[in-house]
Each structure stands twice: as structure tokens, then as C-alpha cells.
Amino acid sequence: MDMLGLITGLPAESAQIPWDGPKIRIIEHQAHAPGHAALLIEERGVLVAGDMLSDILMPFLDLEAADPVEDYLAALLLFESVADDVVAVIPGHGSVGGAEQLRSRINQDRAYVAALRDGGVPDDPRVGPSAPLEWLPDVHRWQLQRLAQRSGRDGTPE
């Protein structure tokens, strides 16, 4: 905690890490949490995705946001917009993947979020009976219920 006071925040809307190292683009979005960001190490083609694009965790939406579904979908579009420049994706949870895994994870996360939005049951192994962590189906049901409450549905999957 002694080091915490030494951290200097970046100015709002910063597009790059201001340092002498490799050029790192900040991809800020509101998908997972307010001010969440991914980092693109441009000369290496490495996307450090933060708490997104996991192969073991489904998307965790910021359910306190005004429009958590659209925020998440917008972030996935941002990742898609840089996908041609990415050779490796590093999520905060799960395993490192290559360019094809990046595209696959974007598509899988988009399908999951669309299923949440529509109140349906996603075809997603991260929340099904073979979920990699036993508590993920419970988190999925909680997210589904919270979104249903926000939209006036009863929370029962269609």
C-alpha cells in the first residue's frame, strides 16, 4: 500500500502509455467496469485484454451501467477493429491465444451477451454443465436475472 501513493493516473482520454518503452495504445471502454481498458502493444501485435476475452470465463457485465449490454458489445467492436493487427491476446483470466482465438473469443462473447440481452440460454461451455469453474453457472443466472429485472422480464430463460 505504501506504493499506492506513487501511482500517477493518466489524463482522461489518454490514447497511449506515455513512456520510453514500446508504443502501447490504450483501448478504453465501459464493458466490464467504469474506465476499464485493454492495452495494445502495437509493434508486437499483443492485446492485453484485462478482464475480457477469456477462454474460461464468460463476460461479466457492469450491471450498474446505464446500458451494460451495449457497453459490452461496443467494447467487442473495438477489439474487432484491431484484430487484424493482433497476433496474441492475453486475458486477465484464462489462457493466452493467437489471432484465431481472439476472433473466436470475440464471437463467443458476442453470442453470450446477445443471449443475456434476449433472456435466452447461451450455447456456451463456460456456463453449461461442463463449465470450467463450478460457480460460473450461478454468476450467469445472476446476470440474467439482473438484466431481466432492468427490462421488466421475470428472469426466466426463454
Image (cartoon, rainbow, N blue to C red):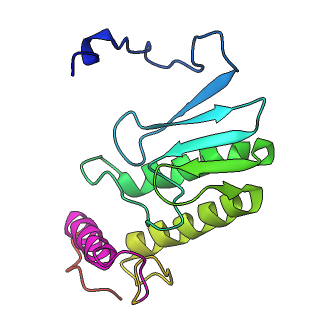
Magenta segment: does it hold 45?
A: no
Q: Nearer the viewer, residue 69 or 15?
A: 15
Q: Residue furthest front?
A: 2
- Expressed as whole percent of the image width and height from the top left, the position of residue 81 reads 70, 44
Q: In this rendered view, identify the residue nearer to me: 84 or 45.
A: 45
The range drawn in magenta is 130-151
Regarding residue 80, the answer to whether it shows in the image is no
Q: Residue at x 27, y 70 (%)?
A: 139
Image spot of residue 126 (x, y percent):
45, 76
Relative height, residue 37 to residue 94 (above, below): above
Residue 14 horizontal/vertical position (percent): 52, 18
At 71% from the left and 49% from the top, the residue drawn is 88
Residue drawn where x is 71% and y is 42% of the image: 82
Q: Is residue 146 above or below residue 39?
A: below
1 horizontally vs 17: left or right: left
Residue 148 magenta-highlighted:
yes
- The answer to whether residue 54 is left or right of residue 78 is left
* Residue 42 visible: yes
Measuring from the top left, give residue 132's x and y in whole percent.
Answer: 42, 77
In the image, residue 30 above or below residue 41: below
Q: Residue at x 40, y 82 (%)?
A: 120
Residue 60 appears in which quarter of the rendering?
Answer: bottom left
